Every structure is written in structure tokens, then in C-alpha cells.
Image (tube, rainbow, N blue to C red):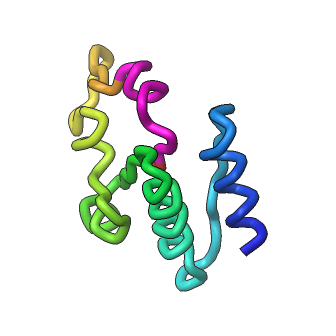
Amino acid sequence: KQWYQRRVAITAGDGSGQCFALQASGGTGKTYTLNLILDTVRSRGDIALATAMSGIAGTLLHNGRTLHSTCGVPINITEDSTCGFSKRDATGEHQMIIF
């Protein structure tokens, strides 16, 4: 609980653009923790995007979508490929983005 409170306060509270990774074995509560963070940020009236690499993983996150759908990342990547996620998207109105 202390880790969660510190991480939400740092990541969503001060606008400093902090990044963190959540890595643990299966069944340890990673999805639960991410959903708790998402719900906390959204309960403050802030915008939090939840993205995942697969549709199945996206369905496990509250209001989650695939990274391809959210950010316009092409499925077939070439050397000329770009995504539709601009700097404004990344820094504009979103308080938190979970990949």
C-alpha cells in the first residue's frame, strides 16, 4: 500500500513525467495494482490512458485499449512508419499513460 501511495503521488501528482516499471510473477496483483492506479487518477478528474500490446491484455485494464488503437502504431512497421501519437497527446491533458 505504501508503494502504491508513493507511486501515485509521484507519478500523477507533480507533473514531473516520472516513469516506472511494474514487474512481478503471474498472480501477484499487477493488473489489480494498475487498475487501482488508473481509478485513483481518474477519480481526481484527471485523464489516464490504459494501453496494452494485445487486445486480451487491454480488456483486463479499466477502459483499456491496444497500443495500436490508442496511439496509431502501425501493425506492419517499415522504415517510413510513424505513429499518430503526438507530443501534445503525450503531454497535453493526460495525467498518466500506462503502456
In depth, the one of 96 and 75 nearer the eye is 96
Tell me: residue 15, above or below residue 33: above
Q: Position of residue 4 (x, y in %)?
A: 68, 66
The image quadrant that residue 58 belongs to is: bottom left
All told, the count of numbered labels is 0
**Which region is colored magenta?**
86-97
Give the side of residue 90 with respect to residue 64, left or right: right
- What residue is rendered at 32% in x and 45% in y? 67
Q: Position of residue 54 (x, y in %)?
A: 30, 58
Residue located farthest toward the bottom when viewing the structure as drawn? 27
Give the side of residue 31 with respect to residue 70, left or right: right
The image quadrant that residue 69 belongs to is: top left
Does the magenta segment cover residue 90?
yes
In depth, the one of 20 and 93 nearer the eye is 93
Tell me: residue 47, above or below residue 5: above
- What residue is rendered at 47% in x and 44% in y? 97
In depth, the one of 2 and 29 nearer the eye is 2
Q: Position of residue 47 (x, y in %)?
A: 41, 44
Q: Position of residue 25 (x, y in %)?
A: 61, 77
Give the side of residue 54 with respect to residue 2, left or right: left
Residue located farthest toward the top when viewing the structure as drawn? 80
Does the magenta segment cover residue 14?
no
- What residue is rendered at 27% in x and 24% in y? 84
Quarter of the image with the N terminus in it: bottom right
Residue located farthest toward the front when viewing the structure as drawn? 44
The image quadrant that residue 17 belongs to is: top right
